[in-house]
Amino acid sequence: MKNTTNLKIYRRYAPIYDSLMRFWTAAPRRKAVELLKLKTGEQLLVPGVGTGLDLPNLPAGVCVTAVDLSPAMLQQARHKRQELVGFNVMDGQVLALPDGCFDALLLNLILSVVPDGPIAMQEAWRVLKPGGRIAIFDKFLPEGSRLSGFRRFAGWLIRQIGTDPNRRFREMIQNIPDALVPVDIPSVLYGQYRLILMIKPVATTK
């Protein structure tokens, strides 16, 4: 799906995004990075890096590739990490990257933003090495809950500013049947946001 609407929205958000998001997302962003247990020399991809609020949380010695659809957001991100980072303008739904080239991915607040969350999730899975990890901090509709008329309307309003609160995580991974999810815990806003760790199994020979 094309992402031109979000490109326009986040071009406007770029100058004020940090002031809106930094304080209340700081703790879960740090926790998401901790879930990855990153090691020196590992290759990390951060799709939808935005203004780079996650970058200061990354440990030294990790090789970071950070991509975002919005050049304006990336411009803000370039000043947030002293170590070298590979910044690229790229759509998280269509990653121009080889299969299985990253040890870990950090997907913070992207699956609820891109037009097609399951496609973005499949792309993340594709570029992840077997045995690799994905950490996610995002908002999802609680599993098993009913989507009420009020929530549908509220979701429609919120989508006008570039994000969808009514997506279900299980729908994000429905086409990734081998995904291991050892961590799925509530986070901010009474669990409307969650912290999730996924692991890609290592193929075994029979």
Image (spheres, helix red, strand yellow):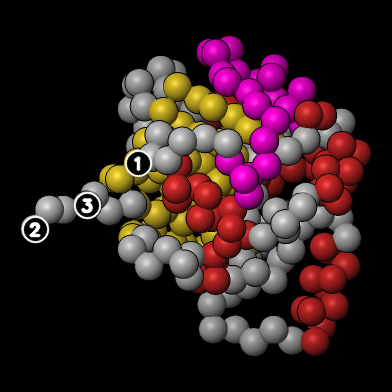
- The quadrant holding residue 56 is top right
Q: Residue at x 54, y 27 (%)?
A: 65
- Spatial CA distance of label 2 from label 3 is 10 Å
Q: Is residue 21 left or right of residue 28?
A: right
**Residue 203: mark:** 3
Residue 23 in sight:
no
Residue to which mark 2 is pinned = 206
Whole-percent x and y of residue 121? 53, 55
Q: Earlier in the sequence, mark 1 or mark 3?
A: 1
Indicate whether residue 80 is drawn in magenta. Answer: yes
106 to 174, vertically: above or below: above
Between label 2 and label 1, give the one nearer the viewer: 2
The amino acid on which the numbered mark 2 sits, given as a three-letter code, is Lys
Q: Secondary structure at mark 3?
A: loop
- Give coordinates of residue 161: x percent, y percent: 86, 55
Quadrant of residue 171 within the rendered picture = bottom right
Task: Specify the segment rendered in magenta.
Answer: 73-95
Q: For mark 1, what is the residue?
A: 129
User: At numbered mark 1, what does the secondary structure look like: helix, strand or loop?
Assistant: strand
